[in-house]
Amino acid sequence: MGALSGLKQRFCTGSVLQVIELKNIEKVYNQGTSTEVRALKNISLSIEQGEIFGVIGLSGAGKSTLIRHINMLERPTSGQVIVDGQDLTAMSESALRSARSRIGMIFQSFNLLSSATVADNIAFPLKLEGKMSDEAIKVRVTELLDLVGLSDKARMYPAQLSGGQKQRVGIARALANNPKVLLCDEATSALDPKTTMSILKLLTDLRDKLNLTIVIITHQMEVIKECCDRVAVIDGGVISEMGPTLKVFTDPQQDLTRRLVSAAVRRDLPELLRHTEIVPEYTEGSKAVIELLFLGPKADAPVIVEVAMLCKVMISILGGSIDHIKKEPFGLMVVEVGGSREEIEHALVELKARVHKVEVLGYDQRKQLSDFQWVGTVLTHGRPVMGGHFTDSVHGRCFISNLYRPWCSSGRAAAYHLPWLFLREP
């Protein structure tokens, strides 16, 4: 049974099979000395069978230390590590070696034997275990090569492969002993974006075919967005946030999570507004700057047009993007809504009824060209300061604008005689 059907069955019956459980994990290096470091602090989490679980954080946050506890390459200072119902922390070294054969692992640097062929690299853990005949190993290696799409690379050496192909060899080797769990420690960090996507697709396909439980450690939110069912954010050895990937992306609770999500879906305020003062309160004539979040079918709906026509407001699109989180359409847009206070509030109500989330970022008090009265044009010698102003005894405070710069009748560019608009606030 595939992982997806297995998950559906458990949800229907109400039972959930936890393959990995970490209970109150603490890891302290140099304990009791002046250089003591608490790398992991009271971490508890559980991962279900057939789930792709992501752990993300900045460098030094404790990601790799955490994943190395799952297969006991690192022993916790305190706490329990339970994998497939077995408490690894209570095992002897010999029992632990046997248990580790059911936990595969792939690495950022591939860790292949440079003097061995692709086939020999994949066969290495099987020969080391010593339970299969040479013929059975050969059959198993052939199956694995086909599984990862490298059937024609068996006799090649690692130096002859691309980065993506090397990682596929690493994946095949990690699957040699039919593990139930696959650990991926920054497995795509050394790969280009296109190759990264192909490796993540392979991992997802393998999860579905083999009912694998996969744990992915990464600092790339793009990786989490592409394939993870749930994600935990680790910060300073503590899990600061955890939940379904879609929820974490659409409603991040912690500042670090917001920054990581921003890097993946470009949630930053558009460049147009970076150097403009956005105030928190509405004043007469200001425009509301609003962030809209769309999910599912609503990501393609003509929401802006509908609300603009219904509420009779002017809506300008400042920036936006449409992406996917595990095949779920996910749209983000920043708009500016102009109108009276009542019209803007009406528009907000209508937007909230149509999209997943609406957030007012503030109010833009910049004056638009249409907000000013035209005074006239003059020919100037030399360039006035862009955006400058002066006080006129007749018109009061006036602004110099270079938004209107027609050519001279002679056809020459106005290098020395530029017509400028003089504008006055109403």
Image (spheres, rainbow, N blue to C red):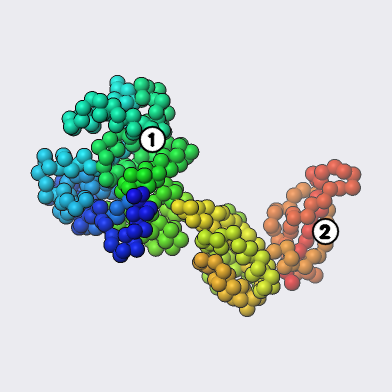
- Up the image or down, 252 lies above or below 50; here it is below
**Residue placed at 11% from the left, 39% from the top?**
94
Q: Nearer the viewer, mark 2 or mark 1?
A: 1
Indicate the position of residue 325 as horizontal and vertical percent values: 47, 54
Hey, what amino acid is under mark 1? Val
Q: Which mark is residue 148?
A: 1
In-front residue for pair 183/406: 183
Hey, what amino acid is under mark 2? Thr
- Up the image or down, 30 lies above or below 159; here it is below
Counting other residues with Cα less than 10 Å from the Cα at mark 1, is it few (<14), some (14-19), or many (20 or more)?
A: many
Residue extending furthest right?
Answer: 410
**Image-quadrant location for residue 164:** top left
In-front residue for pair 343/128: 128
Say if residue 57 shows up in the picture: no
**Residue placed at 26% from the left, 48% from the top?**
66
Residue extending furthest bottom?
Answer: 342
> Label 2's element?
strand
